[in-house]
Structure formats: C-alpha cells, structure tokens
C-alpha cells in the first residue's frame, strides 16, 4: 500500500495531520484561524473533559517567528505549541522552547505527528480570553 506524502511546501498541508492529532488527544472542539487580536491562531482546541485549551502555530521552517506567536498565544490557551515538518525540527532551539513552556510537534512527510516537547501550563493565561474563545468555539459548533 502506497503512503500519501504531504506537500511540505505549504503550511496548510500540516493542518489535517495536526487537527487529527489533537482530536486523538481529547480536544474535541477546535477551530482554525481563531481570531486573537490582530493575529489568528492556526489551530485552537478545547477539551471539555479536562477544561483545557490548546493553541498551535503551524510553520514550515521559520521557528523563531512561530516561537514569538506561540508566546502570545499563552495569553489565551492553557498550552501553546509549534507544529512543523520533521525535517526542520532539528533547527529549533529546544532549550528556549522548554524554558518558556512552548511545546513542539513534529509532522512527518506521511502526516504522522509526534510530540517532541510537551507544553507547560501557561503562567500568563488570561481566563477571560480563554472563556471567550471557548464560548466562540461552542457557538460555532452548535450554530
């Protein structure tokens, strides 16, 4: 059986593997391009079971830019991650991500996701941002 390879020249190719990954991790309600001030979170998920939110920034190779965005997303999510193609994860400063509680998800050419670093609970989370996002997700799912 031939495996389908992802087109890792497009950030959008990471979307389906990563949303599938977070669904398997219990984040049932999610949205893509969730508005957050003048930015949009690539993937934002919510797990009702443990009342946790997750924000994921997708990047092909510009991990420093993704890191800056993931830091901002700690304001609105319990956990903040960067997801990028496996072939570029060796360029990422893992110590810097760990120091700031940002997680890293590697996506293989066949779409398999692997958590390289787990995110820590955000220390700067603003509960009103989180609650507004959860309400938005629930409205969009029910509406």
Image: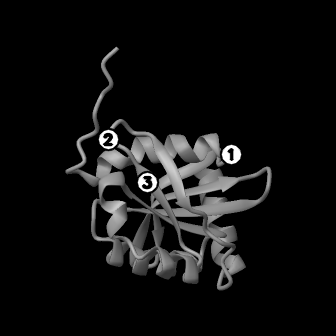
Crowd around label 1: few <14 · some 14–19 · many ≥20 (10 Å): some
The residue that appears at 59% across and 55% down in the rendered structure is 45
Q: Which residue is mark 1?
A: 26
The CA span between labels 1 and 2 is 24 Å
Callout 1–callout 3 Cβ contact below 8 Å: no
Q: Which residue is mark 3?
A: 106
Measure the C-alpha gap from mark 3 to mark 2: 10 Å
**What element does badge 2 sit on?**
loop
Q: Position of residue 116 (x, y in %)?
A: 52, 59
Residue 71 vertical placement versus 41 (above, below): below
Element at label 3: strand
Identify residue for label 2: 109
Expressed as whole percent of the image width and height from the top left, the position of residue 15 reads: 39, 47
Disc 1 secondary structure class: loop
Q: Earlier in the sequence, mark 1 or mark 3?
A: 1
The quadrant in which residue 42 appears is bottom left
- Between 78 and 48, the one lying in front of the other is 78
């Amino acid at each position: 059986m031939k495996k389908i390879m992802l087109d890792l020249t497009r950030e959008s190719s990471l979307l389906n593997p990563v949303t599938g990954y977070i669904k398997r991790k219990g984040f049932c309600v999610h949205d893509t391009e969730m508005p957050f001030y003048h930015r949009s979170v690539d993937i934002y998920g919510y797990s009702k079971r443990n009342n946790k939110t997750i924000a994921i920034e997708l990047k092909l190779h510009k991990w420093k830019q993704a890191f800056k965005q993931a830091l901002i997303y700690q304001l609105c999510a319990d956990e903040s991650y960067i997801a990028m193609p496996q072939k570029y994860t060796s360029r990422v400063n893992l110590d810097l991500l760990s120091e700031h509680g940002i997680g890293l998800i590697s996506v293989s050419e066949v779409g398999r996701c692997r958590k390289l670093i787990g995110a820590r609970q955000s220390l700067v989370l603003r509960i009103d941002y989180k609650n507004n996002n959860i309400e938005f997700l629930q409205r969009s799912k029910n509406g």
